[in-house]
Amino acid sequence: MDGRKILVTGGGGLLASELRRLLPQAYFPNSQVFNVTMYDTMTGFLLDKDISVILHAAALTSPPVCDKDPLKALETNIVGTANVVKLCMKHNIRLIYVSTDYVFRGDQGNYREEDPVYPVNKYAWSKLGGECAVRMYDNSLIIRTSFGPNVFPYEKAFIDQWTSRESVSAIAPKIVQLMFSSVTGTLHVGGPRRTVLEYARSLDPSREIGELSIRGVNFTVPVDTSLDCSLFDQIIPEK
């Protein structure tokens, strides 16, 4: 696929910044020129381009911010995603939606793609709302994943929250492989099950990362949203 046929929403975000290195010819518009809450603006941006794949990564991702401003979360993560779906339907564009492991309740872990979803905070509900919109379009793929910066951004990490999170530099190549595939439906992408502290320390074993409990923060987080990623491993075998 020609990289010039790929558009990544959320051009100023963490994932987009990593994807730029892998897809230098793709389009990475920021919200000023490709605002997902403004359908006409998005349509105008596409006029002189031959886009065949949109990776929808633009989102309001902070759980505390979504709790504080649920209207903004609704407009960006639900209405904005519905706008992107509508755009892809109209122009026959393949859509890949970056969702989250937080759509699960977090009382089980090792979740498979077909397991029941039950968000525990407004951020996760808004991302699940986006998933619902994407499921209305057959030529689409929902990627549930969890990633963070290549350098852990905090001094402490949760000892009692389990995840399949990986660094953005580890997740981005996997997403690119899926962009160049014809996979549809829902797919989990991530690493092994471990605590957030174990994940943080794996990024830089020489760095001291302190311990933190999920009981010590003022927002709700699920306990164990680790993902079963075996289906991805079957579809995209490790080279």
Image: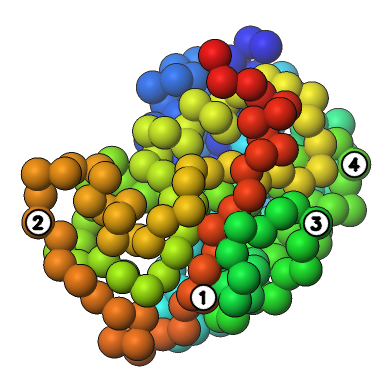
Say if 61 sits above or below 211 in the image: above
Describe the element under mark 4 as helix, strand or loop.
loop
Whole-number angstrom distance, CA of label 2 to CA of label 1: 25 Å
Residue 2: x, y in percent? 63, 10
Under mark 1, the amino acid is Pro
Q: Which mark is residue 138?
A: 4
Mark whose residue sits in front, 2 or 4: 2
For label 1, the crowd category at 10 Å Cα-Cα, with few meaning under 14, some 14 to 19 and many 20 or more, is many
- Please tell me which residue is depicted at 38% across the width and 33% down the height of the picture: 169
Q: Nearer the viewer, residue 180 or 158?
A: 158
Which of pointers 4 and 1 lies earlier in the amino acid sequence? Answer: 4
- Please tell me which residue is depicted at 81% across the width and 43% down the height of the picture: 185
Whole-number angstrom distance, CA of label 4 to CA of label 1: 30 Å
Residue 79: x, y in percent? 70, 65
Say if 159 sits above or below 53 in the image: below
Whole-number angstrom distance, CA of label 2 to CA of label 4: 46 Å
- Please tell me which residue is depicted at 88% across the width and 46% down the height of the picture: 137
Under mark 3, the amino acid is Glu
Describe the element under mark 1 as helix, strand or loop.
loop
Q: Nearer the viewer, residue 173 or 156?
A: 156
Left or right: 53 with respect to 152? right
Q: Which residue is mark 3?
A: 114
Residue 177 in view: yes
